[in-house]
Amino acid sequence: MRFMLILSDLMIPIVLVYILFYGYSKKIDVYDSFINGAEEGFKTVFKIAPTLIGLMVAVGVLRASGALDMLSNLISPISEKVGYPTEAVPLTFMRLISSSASTGILLDIFKTYGVDSFLGNFVSVMMSSTETVFYTMSVYFMAVNITKTRYTLAGALISNFAGVIASLWISRILWG
């Protein structure tokens, strides 16, 4: 076990040294390659900044306006009938848009119900089983100039829904 801890501490330095030696063995100017990559990274950041700002503003409006609570109240009769915890509905929707906003909702659930409650366990599993679909699509597709998304959104939403259902099912089995 101690060997694994030492290896995990050394993994990043080992990879960096390997990259340097590999680059030098292939006669590649590693420093110039790094600078060119960093320059491209900055260009990408400036290119996707408007999308990120738009998403942050949309999340702020959703939370501050109470629209998320209204949507949750609208859906709560259905969620209660199917056995889905009503308290998790806002998190389920926000998780599609923003990881940081959904983490804020997650922390609110932890404060209210506790981390060891069924709801706390369920939302923890759900957070690790789902993705921020709209954020991911907008940022990555914008970065590589993809305009025709075909079935990406439908596939991502279906897989996200499957992750939520699987999280609930697993949580019911483990923490009943």
Image: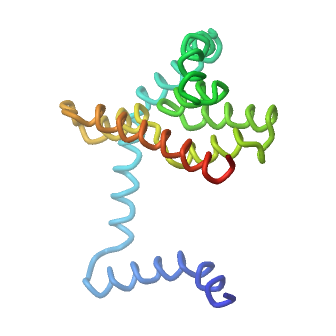
User: Where does the N terminus fall, quadrant-wise?
Assistant: bottom right
* Quarter of the image where one finds residue 7: bottom right
**Residue at position x 61%, y 85% from top?**
4
Viewed as shown, does residue 26 lie left or right of 92? left
Residue closest to the eye, 13 or 37: 13
Residue closest to the eye, 65 or 172: 172
Viewed as shown, does residue 35 lie left or right of 9? left
Residue closest to the eye, 122 or 128: 122
The residue most toward the bottom is 3
**Residue at position x 67%, y 26% from top?**
87
Seen in the picture, residue 15 relative to 106 is either above or below; the reply is below
Seen in the picture, residue 70 relative to 86 is either above or below; the reply is above
How many marks on residues? 0
Viewed as shown, does residue 160 lie left or right of 87? left
**Residue at position x 29%, y 88% from top?**
25
Residue closest to the eye, 139 or 158: 158
Colour scheme employed for the rendering of this structure = rainbow
Seen in the picture, residue 124 relative to 142 is either above or below; the reply is below
Q: Position of residue 96 (x, y in %)?
A: 47, 32
Viewed as shown, does residue 30 lie left or right of 170? left
Q: Position of residue 167 (x, y in %)?
A: 54, 45
Q: Position of residue 153 (x, y in %)?
A: 30, 32
**Residue at position x 54%, y 15% from top?**
75
* Quarter of the image where one finds residue 143: top left
Q: Position of residue 133 (x, y in %)?
A: 41, 35
